[in-house]
Image: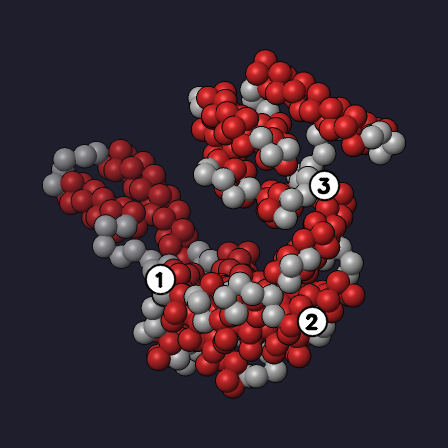
Amino acid sequence: MMLWFVFALMTAAAIFAVLWPLGRSRRPQQDGSEAVVYRDQLAELDRDVSAGLINPPEAGAARVEISRRLLAAADNQAEPASGTNVRLRRAAAIVALLGLPVIAVGIYYPLGSPGMADFPLAQRARTPEATQSLDNLVAQVEQHLEKNPADGRGWSVLAPVLGRLGRLDEAVRAFRNSITYNGESADRRADLGEALVAAAGGVVTAEAKTEFERAVALNADEVKASYFLGLAAEQDGRAEEAASIWRAMLEKAPPNAPWRPLVQAALVRVGGSPAPVLSNDAMAAAKDMSETDRGAMIRSMVERLATRLKQNGDDVEGWLRLVRAYIVMGDADKAKSAQSDARTAVAKDPERLKQLNEGLKNMGLDG
């Protein structure tokens, strides 16, 4: 309320500043005006004639001229302000009186916030959110959800943050509430399953597996759920089933999928081939070969890849494929040699070296 009162005073002052000069009327000049000067000249002329300082004919001519000027000056003083000037002043006053507030309101409504309520004093003292700690922000969200437990968006925001803070049991509860109030979806089921795995120390429990199966039922291409179903099979000792799940994921995955290295490393871990060194046509032809011929063909392709990389060592993905191939073939010495050659080839390129080290780490090797 005080703010509006200040604005009203400022508006009144601005209007008064404009209207004050418009409302002032001209005052006829008294002292020092032309009429006074001409009257003094006539009186002085009469004194000169009486004293014999000027001839009467000359005095008469001078009196006529001075009288003419006196009459003209008197007419100018008595002339009232013209009607046009009065109308202009009135128009300017009306514009100032009504136009300034209208213009001010017209600018404020599109640019200001007339509907915004006053900011409570308690909130003014709060630290800006950008400078608050994550724990404080989480506490504020939790307080909000205590008052609004059906806010599905709030649960979906809170759940992953709780997981990153290590509050795993609370994260599981938040993910469940997110499903309850936001509705069921493949990614929400997969997120809940992942939280259950984290809470169990990395073990895919029966409850978590159920969530992943629900996610895949909703979306067969749900990556996270498919990966953990493969992990569940691996933990149950079903390596072939795990390899089959992960291999199917890689076959459908785009070449630049960010999760490819993780799945490829998991496939190597259970003894599967993470990515065929051969082309699709060569792999189809290899199916009709004997085991010996197929092995010889694969080794030949691996050696050709190694030769190509020695000539052009910038292909980080090629180096990773070569290392994987040697691991799958059981040739640990060549795998180590390939790692060393790869690092030497990309040593001058920090970005490629970082990519190489991350790929090796994802395969469970020393990156």
Secondary structure under tag 2 reads: helix
* Residue at 67% from the left image edge and 53% from the top image edge: 239
Secondary structure under tag 1 reads: helix
The quarter of the displayed image where residue 129 is located: bottom left
On the rendered structure, is 59 left or right of 158? left
- Between 81 and 242, the residue placed more toward the observer is 242
Which quadrant would the N terminus be assigned to in this image? bottom left
Which percent across, then down, holds residue 317?
61, 31
The CA span between labels 2 and 1 is: 41 Å
On the rendered structure, is 340 left or right of 48? right
Q: Which label's residue is closer to the chain start, 2 or 1? A: 1
* Residue at 29% from the left image edge and 37% from the top image edge: 62
- Amino acid type at image mark 1: Thr
Tell which tag, 2 or 1, sits nearer the viewer: 2
Q: Which label's residue is closer to the chain start, 3 or 2? A: 2
Q: Residues within 10 Å of mark 2 (few under 14, many from 20)?
A: some
Tell which tag, 1 or 3, sits nearer the viewer: 3
- Amino acid type at image mark 2: Thr
Numbered badge on residue 210: 2
Numbered badge on residue 254: 3
Residue located beneath label 1 in the image? 131
* Residue at 21% from the left image edge and 48% from the top image edge: 40
The CA span between labels 3 and 2 is: 27 Å
Residue 147 seen from this side:
yes
